[in-house]
Amino acid sequence: MLFHVDTCMTEGGLNVTLTIRLLMHGREVGSVIGQKGESVKRMPEESGAGVSVSEGSCPERMTALAGPTRAIFKAFAAIIDKLEEDITSFATNSTAAGGSC
């Protein structure tokens, strides 16, 4: 993960904008994007953070989260929840199909 922090003083006090870049494998990025891009479009609305995913078909892609610290936390938590949901779903489907570890 890469971090970048911008700070400035405003009338209300210190304003901190954080950018976190996550290097993710293709399957993980697919979970973040969702079908027809629904998940990645919904995250900024729900978290208040900017969320972008790099273009390309390479094995690893960059997902960037930018905004105030609380918004970044919400977006990151949403990504983790989505990945966990997909892993659980995959494990359940594999077990139902007779797969083993």
Image (cartoon, grey):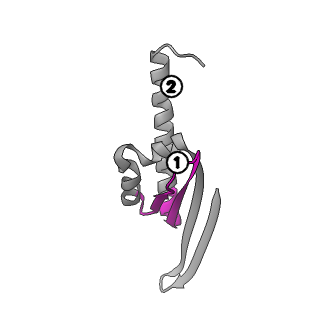
Q: Which comes sooner in the sequence, label 2 or label 1?
A: 1
Q: Nearer the viewer, mark 2 or mark 1?
A: 1
Q: Is residue 21 magenta?
A: no
Of 60 and 83, the residue lying toward us: 60
As drawn, 3 above or below 63: below
88 left or right, relative to 3: left
Q: Which circle marks residue 91 in the picture? A: 2
As drawn, 91 above or below 2: above
Outermost residue to the bottom: 11
Quadrant (top left, top right, bottom left, bottom right) of the N terminus: bottom right
The stretch in magenta equals 47-73
Quadrant (top left, top right, bottom left, bottom right) of the C terminus: top right
Q: Is residue 61 magenta?
A: yes
Q: Secondary structure at mark 1?
A: loop
Residue sitting at x 37%, y 55%: 41
Image coords of residue 79 (percent x, y): 49, 48
Residue sitting at x 63%, y 63%: 3
Q: CA distance from mark 2 to mark 1?
A: 26 Å
Image coords of residue 86 (percent x, y): 47, 35
As drawn, 3 above or below 78: below
10 Å crowding of disc 2: few (<14), some (14-19), many (20+):
some
